[in-house]
Image (spheres, grey):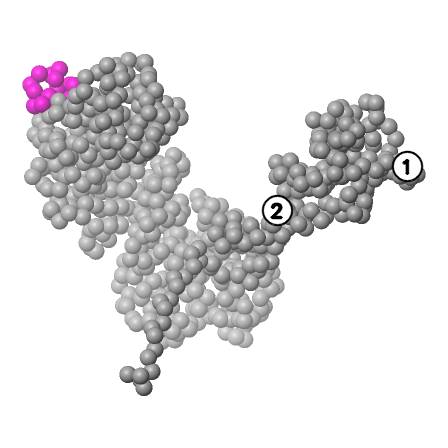
Amino acid sequence: MSIAKVSVEKFNSPEQILFEFDKDDTLESNVARICNLVGLPKTYVYGIKYQPTKTCDKNHYLSENNVQDLKHSDCLKIAFSLEFIISRTKMNLKNEDPAMRQIAFDDICKLCEDPVFIEKLGESNGDKVILEVFCNDEGLTPEERVALLRTVVHLFTKGYIQDTTQNILQKAFDILKSFNPLLDEIKFTLLLLQNILVNPNENFTEWKQIIIKNLPLLKLTPYVWQKAQPDLQYASLRLINTLIKISDHQKRRELIKEMNLKQNRENMYHHIIMERNYGKDMEHELYILQFYLLSLFNEGLNSKICIDNNTFFTRDEFELNPNDLRPPTILLDFEEEIGASRYSGFNYEQLQQYPRKPSLPNKDCISHLTLEALRYYRNAHAKNFQQSQIEEQLYEPGIFITSERVVNMLAEMFHIGNATPCEHSTFYQPLVFYCPARTPFLLEIFSHCMWLLSRTRREMKVATGVDYEKVMYILKKQVKSALNTKPKNFKSLAAELSNTTFKSVMENKRISEEKELQVLIDTHPCIQELKQKLLKENEEIVLKQRLGILMNGAPFSRVLEKKLQQRVYIKLSKNKKELQVFDQAHNLKESLLVSDITHIVIGKNCDHANLAPKPDLAFSIIIKIVEEKLKCVAKDEQTACYWTDGLLLLLNQGRPEKLSKYYSEELEQLVAMDVRLQILELQNISIPNAPPPEPPLPQVLIPESVL
């Protein structure tokens, strides 16, 4: 029998009763028993809902589907049942009496967020009444429209609206075109359009095309700038991304170009990114928009040109004559002053015109995007480019191959060339939205990467092509680490890249691997089983160590007659059956049988704790026969803890809660070291959480001679 002990507030009264809610019984039976306890008649009029408290903000109705979520100490209240409220609402919405209609709208406004209400409304065909009033009643106030809109949006989300018999779409367009609508009206209208666009039902295909055709971005972008309304910003940006996603290729490109206009990008930067008034959901939408903006580079990335025979450039433009090569002696700082007059700006249309050729081996071809990046680097950062020219030709594999590798690295990092954005990524960059036309984000960051490559090669002391892959691996880590800080301008980006050295990357790599290993040790079931085995083995080791300390002995101050007396030397005999007490001259004064010791008193519980410099230094050995105590004060806390641990273990009283912190720390350290030694060969290897399935038993082989 599954019982939840809850409090129930009476109907229209703050008085409460305690009730044992039987979750194995039906909800109707529980409601009937509650009504019987408070003196209400058994009728469908009453139901049960959560009562919000300081620790629990639940406010929805109970149903057969969620009653198992009920827990001890939850607070409930008796209220009108949803069946009664829905029946009343359906009648009152059609009533001409304003007071009755107001009751209906009040009910809708209170319950439109309740998932149980939405479920009951859809099951009872109440959604059709809601849609009819929403679409056809011209006398609705803005507040009434908001209440109905919220309900319609949740009905769409739950899948209860599956046809286009009511022209909801036209009503949504009317709200957006209306004069000075409420911000909540706009927000829920945008959510409604969003639900229509993502609905997989084919009945809404025509509506989707109408939205794409008749909803210009110019109508949506002003809502993105409403920085005082983050929910409205999120709804509008999400709708923009959805419009781009479901449009055909030509329309999608037009929408992306419109969002890539300098004014739109800068407004996005100033009104959303700089405000930082958003969460992970908004970050994901910014990433999606960034994905679409950077997709303008797709054609340039996918079109290849041969570096030896083409009409676009000559190798002499980017490679030096071998006779002119001299090893650079110093590393130049990154050239902050952009040579704007030498670079005319990036033309996305030019990339579209490049012919697509089949991919050639990397050493023979580069993408048109790489060519544009090299030209930008040469024109905008001439001194740094010359340094890269020399180093790539001296140290291999050459500036063309390295540039192609860097461009592909950035494309992979920003998902350029991917068919769809990542479902959960929040890797957006403010610089994508706030960079001048003459310094395109991708080309500028390419220039920074080429400069950083030169510095990393020097830090790693690489002078040949043998370690080239290692250098590129570290470069990727450096760039990703710098971009994770989301720099807001190129100066901040340069500073972050400068601070991300080879040593810092290796240290971060070590820390990351250590964290992964620790998670594996703490959570993997096989390792937990191994730890239990090693724990028992190491308990024996710690016990031997503590007994060894007792047998070696230690000096203590002894307390007699409530005063600190002479120093004594106490040790455990070799046969572990006696505690021997010596004076300062090492003469044996007395011997105490271990079997006569009843228990050990530690720290503040000792009578003489006030005589010790610190209470933790005091402990008492209680003797059974003579009913006396051997009261001691240790020279330091570790000695006191080691001795009390040893004595408790010797007496078989070593329960974990009685032993000192040193015991648990040392035992944990020993187990951790043993575990790491045991799995040393498995590091950097993925260990499955479950064993592989057992293979089927082999079939019995019958010799042919028997057949």
Q: CA distance from mark 2 to mark 1?
A: 37 Å
Q: On the image, numbered disc 1 is attached to which residue? A: 584
Q: How many marks?
A: 2
Which of labels 2 and 1 is toward the front? 1
Q: Is residue 102 magenta?
A: yes
Q: Residues within 10 Å of mark 2 (few under 14, many from 20)?
A: some
Residue segment shown in magenta: 91-104
The residue depicted at 89 percent of the width and 39 percent of the height is: 588
Q: Is residue 415 left or right of residue 608?
A: left
Reading the chain from its start, which is encountered first: label 2 or label 1?
Answer: 1
Looking at this view, name the residue that lies furthest to the right.
585
Q: Nearer the viewer, residue 41 or 207?
A: 41
Query: Is the residue 65 above or below the residue 561 in the image?
Result: below
The x and y percentages for residue 404 are: 41, 65
Secondary structure at numbered mark 2:
helix
Question: Dividing the image into 4 quarters, which one contains the C terminus?
Answer: bottom left
Residue placed under numbered mark 2 in the picture: 668
Q: Please, what is the dominant secondary structure of the magenta stretch?
A: helix
